[in-house]
Amino acid sequence: MVKKKIRAEALARRIALSNADFWHLNDQLLEQIKAFDWSNINYLHIFLPIKEKKEIDTFDFLSYFKIHHPRIKIVIPRSDFENISLSNVLFDHEHTILVKNKYQIPEPLYGKIISSDKIDAVLVPLLAFDNLGNRIGYGAGFYDRFLNTCRVDCKKIGLSFYEVTTDLLPLESFDQLLTHCITPKRTYIF
């Protein structure tokens, strides 16, 4: 029940953002992305935003990586709702065709599947996080299951418009901890 309440409050807060505030926070997040050390990253998994839920617009991040880190291979998720799992599809700026699934998540229609063990860092969607690296997402468990398949040394980087939640979030046995969380003001390291 506690997670459900935190989830609802965090989502309502984000959806209430004005367009100006949303883009200001998104631009600040991009500045933090630019300051992060990407030198040891070869494969980077980036989620694509549900615009209807005012998720962080990671399309700006895709453009940044294309121009400033062209050697990094970008991987984007495709959901399998029957198995509650994600496939990692290699993203190509010119050829990847995106379609929205039933939850309005843009996903690649086709593309080369990349094994989770190749991924060096994952940008993780979330609604709230605490100072230990616990996160709350939408509750289906897609990212917890996916992160569990990644290498132990894979960086699990949350993205949040808001700073750390002061209270410790409820933790369940299958929850995967973040290694970092990037906000408009700073990068947390756990």
Image (cartoon, rainbow, N blue to C red):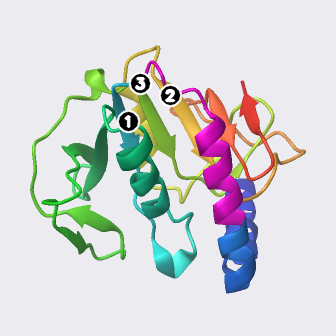
Direction right: furthest residue: 166
Q: Is residue 32 magenta?
A: yes
Disc number at residue 149? Answer: none
Q: Secondary structure at mark 1?
A: strand
Amino acid type shown at disc 2: Trp
Front residue (pair 186, 68): 68
Image quadrant holding the C terminus, namely top right
Amino acid type shown at disc 1: Leu
Residue visible at 10% across and 50% down in the picture: 111
Left or right of residue 94, residue 138 in this image: right
Dots 2 and 3: beta carbons under 8 Å? yes
Dots 2 and 1: beta carbons under 8 Å? yes
**Residue 112 falls in image quadrant:** top left
Image quadrant holding the N terminus, namely bottom right
Residues shaded magenta: 25-40
Q: Residues within 10 Å of mark 1 (few under 14, many from 20)?
A: many
Q: Is residue 55 above or below residue 21?
A: above
Disc number at residue 44? Answer: 1
Front residue (pair 28, 180): 28
Dots 3 and 1: beta carbons under 8 Å? yes
Mark 2 to mark 3 CA distance (whole Å):
5 Å
Amino acid type shown at disc 3: Ile
Left or right of residue 42, residue 140 in this image: right
**Residue 42 falls in image quadrant:** top left
Residue visible at 66% across and 79% down in the picture: 15
Front residue (pair 51, 7): 51
